[in-house]
Image (tube, rainbow, N blue to C red):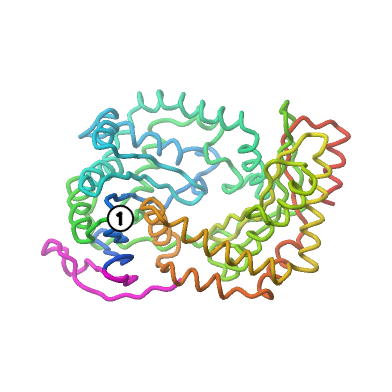
Amino acid sequence: MTSRSTTTTARTSPEARAVARTQTLIKGENGTGTVRRTTLPGGLRIVTDTLPSVRSATFGIWAHVGSRDETPSLNGATHYLEHLLFKGTNRRSALDISAALDAVGGEMNAFTAKEYTCYYARVLDTDLPLAIDVVCDMLTGSLILQEDVDVERGAILEEIAMTEDDPGDCVHDLFAHTMFGDNPLGRPVLGTVDTVNALTADRIRRFYRRHYDPTHLVVAAAGNVDHNKVVRQVRAAFEKAGALRDHAAQPIAPRDGRRTIRTAGRVELIGRRTEQAHLVLGMPGLARTDDRRWALGVLNTALGGGMSSRLFQEVREKRGLAYSVYSYTSGFADCGLFGVYAGCRPSQVHDVLKICRDELDHIAEHGLSDEEIGRAVGQLRGSTVLGLEDTGALMNRIGKSELCWGEQMSVDDMLARIASVTPDDVRSVARDILGRRPSLSVIGPLKDKQASRLHDAVA
């Protein structure tokens, strides 16, 4: 990633002025698209992306903690904590938190992933100070009371049950387990019924204190925002909570991974009474820092990223064997996944699997045509820009970039990296990724004879 920076002194208290740093990471035109970062004493980073032409703003706080940071007995703690931070602080009850944003027509939510967690609010630009105060209060002043833990446990168990009732969603959790096994990356983000039932307020509170100090947090705001005002308001909120006491603390570095063990040729099947069989066929992918990820993105788009893609044409358009079929990539700090998903009638699962396997093998050996690659480059460039057309997407981009890479990349630089991908780059990454022995995960009403054939299909 690239970043261009100039350093100035942020407007802070005399005690902090010597160590606060503000940088312009991306210089936009006429103020639009300017990305700036301020690092406060105490290690809190604040990044903003200014877009004066809109009347909204999205404010988020990213925490450098995900389900990957959990021990087996703590599986689900990160997601549990996400719920609990909405349950109340010393200053606000759960109703106060939700009512504050509802009263101004704002939206507030959060999500937990395997390597990070994000809490965010989208509001009118004039209501940004309110969003900042509420979200910062949640992150710094959560009470995590036993009664709230008990109440929210039921909601989380229902969320687990809802996921289990959706095999098209559940099969991706199964595939992670197929690839990574009993490893933090292979466990479900939500946890299991047993681990969620075993979590106590004390254990979650300790987890909160360990992972939610300012050095582990990135504040991100995008839209019609003024960087200096955001910095002052965030600093005031954190100082009010006493969260910036250690002025010598520095932000933690981006995650470098733990050399996760990846497997090949494994098959995991879950028999379930469903109308469709849901399958994921895949193999190890690339870490998110791998320079080949741009070529892999083009390959993924051409293989299963749209209606003109190989898989869509072969499985759905020509044969009508599935309604939904696509490929995807997931990149982590030290490893990644490449997968092909399809949902089909149980009687067709072997035909669908054979077509997908044949396409992967053929592309690994012979590559894609220049026409397919050119079309995928154009599609990926267009979807990249269209996906950044709202303040929420912009906030996600700068927040995740700061947390995961420690630097920013402009949209123009991203488009240039995609455009620079050559057919040889795509063919090379196809050989490296698709040439590996795949693993398979399937959920559906499978008979014993079918299960045996599915094991043979990845041999």
- First to last magenta residue range: 1-30
In the foreground, 415 or 208? 415
Q: Residue beneath label 1, please?
A: 223
Identify the residue at image location x=63%, y=59%: 301
Q: Which residue lies furthest to the left in this view?
A: 14
Identify the residue at image location x=57%, y=75%: 420
Q: Where is residue 341 in the image (x, y as percent from the top left)?
A: 68, 46
Pointer 1 local density, CA inside 10 Å: few below 14, some 14–19, many at least 20: many
Q: Please, is residue 394 above or below residue 144 in the view?
A: below
Q: Place residue 151 in its image quadrant.
A: top left
**In the image, residue 17 lies in the stretch drawn in magenta:** yes
Q: What residue type is labelled 1?
A: Gly
The chief SS type of the magenta part is loop
Q: Position of residue 335 (x, y in %)?
A: 60, 59
**In the image, residue 171 lies in the stretch drawn in magenta:** no
Asked if residue 201 can be seen in this view, the reply is yes
Q: What element carries label 1?
A: strand
In the foreground, 378 or 427? 378
Answer with left or right where residue 190 lies relative to residue 407.
right
In the foreground, 119 or 101? 101
Q: Where is residue 453 in the image (x, y as percent from the top left)?
A: 87, 41
Q: Place residue 375 in its image quadrant.
A: bottom right
Answer with left or right where residue 18 lies relative to residue 391.
left
